[in-house]
Image (cartoon, rainbow, N blue to C red):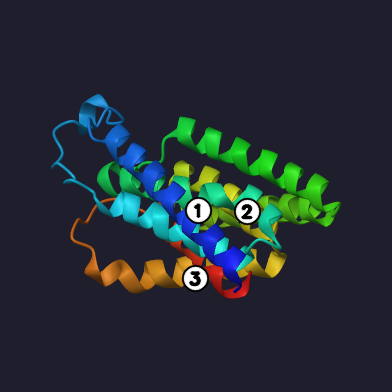
């Protein structure tokens, strides 16, 4: 890592921290809760959100550096929407459609922009394959074990697949493998025996796979 990469990483970490503070402020009023969810326990101050967005943003900047910065276009939103969606999923065991739609659009636009900037159309092809295969696998697992996943997960999975596959198909594979292994390992430590929040593990798996194999 050279001096430019250090500055780049620090700048994106700082940007991630500010975005995380904005997300935390946005979630503070719990307006995302439905009527039947308003009586649930308060999730607390959630200062971990800006820490997570800062760390994740810096991690991606460190991995790609200045030389491969176009790959941040389809992946950087993972660092911001991952903690945002995770906070909601941990609270109400649900991933809001509107946030998923915005996240999906940002990934799609980022994939196209990265392909245009680099002149590498394989980025688009890989993202399309990753997103499609991820959804098909989810559909098969959901049919094999009805109720095992929520449809919020089903919408989030192809977004994760497309974003990680834009880096490489192997990164997408590792993202889902890490997410599944981590989720299974964490199962005995669950405090609330309700629907399982898979969203946080998807976000962690994606970022860990990019950092390790990207």
Which residue is more in the foreground, 41 or 84?
A: 84
Q: Which residue is mark 1?
A: 12
Q: Residue at x 31, y 30 (%)?
A: 32
Q: Residues within 10 Å of mark 1 (few under 14, many from 20)?
A: many
Question: Image quarter for residue 155?
Answer: top right
| SS label for mark 1 | helix
| Residue furthest front as drawn | 3
* Mark 2 or mark 1, whichever is nearer to me: 1
Q: Is residue 152 rendered to the left or right of residue 2?
A: left
Residue displayed at 61% across by 72% down:
2
Image disc number at residue 72:
2
Between discs 2 and 1, the one toward the N terminus: 1
Mark 1 or mark 3: name the one nearer the start of the chain.
Answer: 1
Q: Report the residue marked by disc 3.
A: 178
Q: What residue appears at the point 44 percent right and 73 percent down from the top-left corner?
A: 181
Q: Earlier in the sequence, mark 2 or mark 3?
A: 2
Nearer to me, 41 or 145: 41
Residue 43, picture quadrant: top left
Q: Are marks 1 and 3 in contact (CB under 8 Å)?
A: no
Q: Is residue 59 above or below residue 90?
A: below
Is the residue under label 1 in contact with that under label 2 (CB below 8 Å)?
A: yes
Q: CA distance from mark 1 to mark 3?
A: 25 Å
Dot 2 falls on a residue whose secondary structure is: helix
Alpha carbon separation for disc pair 2 and 3: 21 Å
């Amino acid at each position: 890592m050279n001096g430019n990469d250090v500055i780049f990483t620090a700048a994106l970490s700082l940007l991630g921290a500010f975005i995380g503070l904005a997300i935390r402020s946005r979630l503070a009023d719990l307006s995302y809760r439905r009527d039947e969810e308003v009586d649930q326990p308060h999730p607390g101050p959630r200062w971990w959100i800006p820490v997570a967005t800062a760390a994740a943003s810096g991690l991606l900047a460190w991995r790609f550096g200045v030389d491969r910065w176009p790959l941040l276009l389809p992946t950087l939103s993972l660092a911001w929407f991952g903690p945002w969606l995770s906070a909601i999923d941990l609270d109400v065991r649900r991933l809001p459609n509107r946030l998923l739609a915005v996240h999906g659009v940002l990934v799609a636009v980022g994939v196209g922009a990265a392909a245009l900037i680099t002149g590498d159309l394989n980025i688009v092809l890989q993202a399309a394959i990753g997103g499609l295969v991820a959804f098909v696998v989810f559909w098969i697992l959901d049919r094999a074990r009805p109720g095992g996943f929520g449809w919020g997960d089903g919408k989030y999975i192809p977004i994760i697949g497309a974003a990680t596959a834009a880096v490489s198909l192997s990164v997408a594979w590792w993202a889902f493998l890490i997410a599944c292994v981590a989720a299974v390992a964490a199962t005995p430590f669950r405090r609330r025996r309700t629907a399982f929040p898979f969203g946080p593990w998807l976000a962690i798996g994606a970022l860990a796979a990019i950092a390790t194999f990207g």
